[in-house]
Image (cartoon, helix red, strand yellow):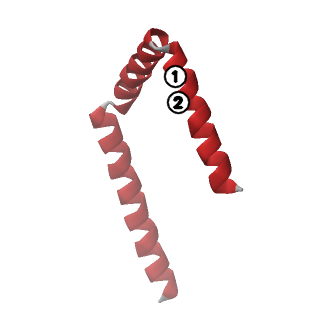
Amino acid sequence: MEDNILNDLNDELEDVIHEGRELLDAENLGERFDELKTDAELMIRKNPIKSVLIGALAGFVIAKIFK
């Protein structure tokens, strides 16, 4: 009986993973990520001083959180 339950759970898990992969492929997340990366690079190049200050502030806050 336990084997049937485990097999059913494994089948359902495989179905969910397959559906998730199809969803990611359909949404073209790779292309969206590349666009976001390009936009971020352009923004950093336009405002280098602000970018450095924001990065330093983010690092400081993260360091305080984990201390």
- The residue lying toward the viewer, choosing from 6 and 52, is 52
**Residue 64, image x, y percentages:** 66, 51
Q: Tell me what residue is drawn at x 34 percent, y 27 percent.
A: 32
Furthest toward the left, the residue is 26
In the image, is residue 39 above or below residue 1? above
Q: Residues within 10 Å of mark 1 (few under 14, many from 20)?
A: some
Q: Tell me what residue is drawn at x 27 percent, y 35 percent.
A: 26
Furthest toward the right, the residue is 67
The residue that disc 1 covers is 51
Element carrying mark 2: helix
- The residue lying toward the viewer, choosing from 34 and 22, is 34
Is residue 23 rendered to the left or right of residue 34?
left
**Mark 2: amino acid:** Ile
The residue that disc 2 covers is 54
Q: Residues within 10 Å of mark 2 (few under 14, many from 20)?
A: few
- What label does residue 41 carry, if any? none
Occupied quadrant, residue 35: top left
**Residue 44, image x, y percentages:** 48, 16
> In the picture, which quadrant includes the C terminus?
bottom right
